Amino acid sequence: MYTFAVLTCSDTAFSGKRDDTSGKILVAAFEALGFALTHHEITPDDPDIIATKLSSWSDDSINLILTTGGTGLSERDVTPEATMSIADQQVPGIQEAIRAYGQTKTPFAILSRGVCVIKRKTLIINLPGSEGGVRDGIEVLEPIISHALGQLTNHDRGH
């Protein structure tokens, strides 16, 4: 069984002004896939706090970290930069697929700057903060995520 964590990056959710609906959608979807939740937290849009949390969770050998929020074009959208600051490797194809799929539903999907990286043996995927963007990400990830994590953890030697 793979483990996962969800980090919601949002000043408004952190301050309690907005419910963390997107984070809850991610938790429900990945638990339904049989993944074991280790953490679900909300952080402000602060690159140092985000990077510290991602690095700490990667040190704990969590298989998958999903972030939601902070991927847009505004000044406070810093999740991709925080994620890249701790990355060992990039996995651009996953984000390319998420944006391409999202664009079939809304032209705004291409405005997401989310990244996908590897830190140690942890796959970290940035998703938008919107419910629609998160659902699009889930639809793209469902058929490939177990295979990706199997490769990363050396449990899938099918190549």
Image (cartoon, rainbow, N blue to C red):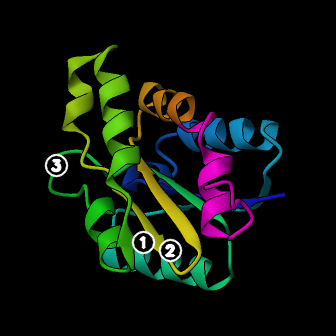
- Secondary structure under the numbered disc 1 in the rendered image: helix
Say which quadrant the C terminus sits in: bottom right
Dot 3: few (<14), some (14–19), or many (≥20) neighbours within 10 Å?
Answer: few
Left or right of 109 in this view: 34: right
Can you identify the residue that label 1 sits on? 50
Name the quadrant containing residue 50: bottom left
Q: Which residues are magenta?
A: 141-159
Q: Of circles 2 and 1, which is in front?
A: 2
Name, please, the residue furthest toward the front. Answer: 159
Q: Amino acid at mark 2?
A: Leu
Query: x%, y% of residue 71?
Result: 29, 49
Task: Give the label on residue 74, or none.
Answer: 3
Task: Give the label on residue 54, or none.
Answer: 2
- Is residue 5 in sight in this rendering? no
- Secondary structure under the numbered disc 2 in the rendered image: helix
Q: Amino acid at mark 3?
A: Ser
Above or below, 130 against 121 in this view is above
Alpha carbon separation for disc pair 2 and 1: 6 Å
Left or right of 143 in this view: 128: left
Alpha carbon separation for disc pair 1 and 3: 17 Å
